[in-house]
Image: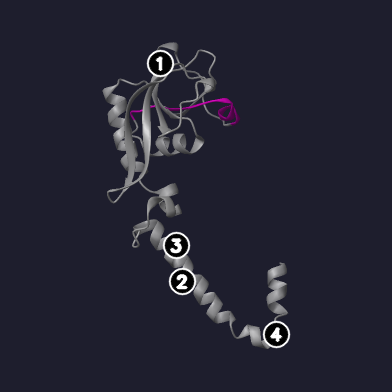
């Protein structure tokens, strides 16, 4: 509201710049959308916020699915909400994705897992140690995989075989059954 009032109170001299300012804003918005969708300017991943947040999840999910099937994992999870949610969206329907930790109890998701299904795969950003206090048992490293866009690495993730403690708060984000 204050911005509109200020624009209305602007003098005649500043109003002549309004169309140019609107055009520049439109061009900048179009550039951001183009970069997010097609990445016409090959920015380094650490300097490209669209790549850091949006790109390469399907490539990562393909590698995670392959690793989960090879390891006979009953579920896949990530230690952060973002990783878990992206994997739930991108992984094939035959792979169960769970959320582990207290924050997941605020979602209206099923929360029971049979005790036989408590061994799975944890996807963790490289260089970060798995959080065993979240309800995970011992974590065994089984490899790593890169999230990529057009052959350029955005971020590398470590894969761990984990077991869930019986007391771990679990929410089934995507059920493969």
| Residue at far front of view | 127
| Residue assigned mark 2 | 27
Element assignment for label 2: helix
Q: Can you say whether 80 is above or below 138 in the image?
A: below
User: Considering only order in the chain, which callout, 2 or 4, is on the residue closer to the N terminus?
Assistant: 4
Mark closest to the chain's N terminus, 2 or 1 = 2
Horizontally, is 111 left or right of 42 in the view?
right
Tell me: residue 111, above or below residue 83.
above
Q: Secondary structure at mark 1?
A: helix
Q: Is residue 147 above or below residue 95?
A: below
SS assignment at label 3: helix
Left of 22 or right of it: where is 69? left
Q: Residue at x 33, y 28 (%)?
A: 94
Q: Give the distance between the C-alpha atoms of the residues marked 2 and 3, in whole angstroms.
A: 9 Å
Q: Identify the residue position indicated by label 3 in the image.
A: 32
Q: Mark 4 or mark 1: which is in front?
A: 4
Return the disc, 4 or 1, that comes first in the chain's sequence. Answer: 4
The colour mode here is one colour
Up the image or down, 45 lies above or below 142; here it is: below
Q: Which residue is mark 4?
A: 11
Q: CA distance from mark 4 to mark 2?
A: 25 Å
């Amino acid at each position: 509201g204050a911005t509109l009032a200020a624009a209305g109170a602007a003098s005649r001299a500043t109003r002549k710049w309004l169309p140019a300012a609107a055009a520049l804003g439109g061009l900048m918005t179009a550039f951001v959308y183009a970069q997010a969708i097609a990445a016409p300017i090959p920015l380094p991943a650490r300097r490209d916020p669209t790549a850091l947040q949006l790109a390469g999840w399907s490539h990562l999910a393909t590698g995670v699915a392959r690793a989960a099937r090879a390891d006979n994992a009953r579920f896949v999870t990530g230690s952060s909400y973002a990783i878990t949610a992206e994997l739930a969206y991108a992984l094939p329907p035959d792979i169960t994705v769970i959320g582990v930790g207290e924050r997941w109890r605020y979602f209206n998701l099923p929360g029971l897992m049979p005790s036989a299904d408590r061994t799975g795969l944890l996807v963790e950003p490289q260089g970060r140690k798995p959080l065993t206090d979240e309800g995970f048992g011992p974590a065994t490293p089984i490899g790593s995989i890169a999230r990529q866009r057009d052959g350029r690495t955005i971020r590398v993730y470590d894969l761990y075989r984990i077991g869930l403690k019986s007391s771990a708060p679990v929410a089934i984000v995507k059920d493969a059954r």
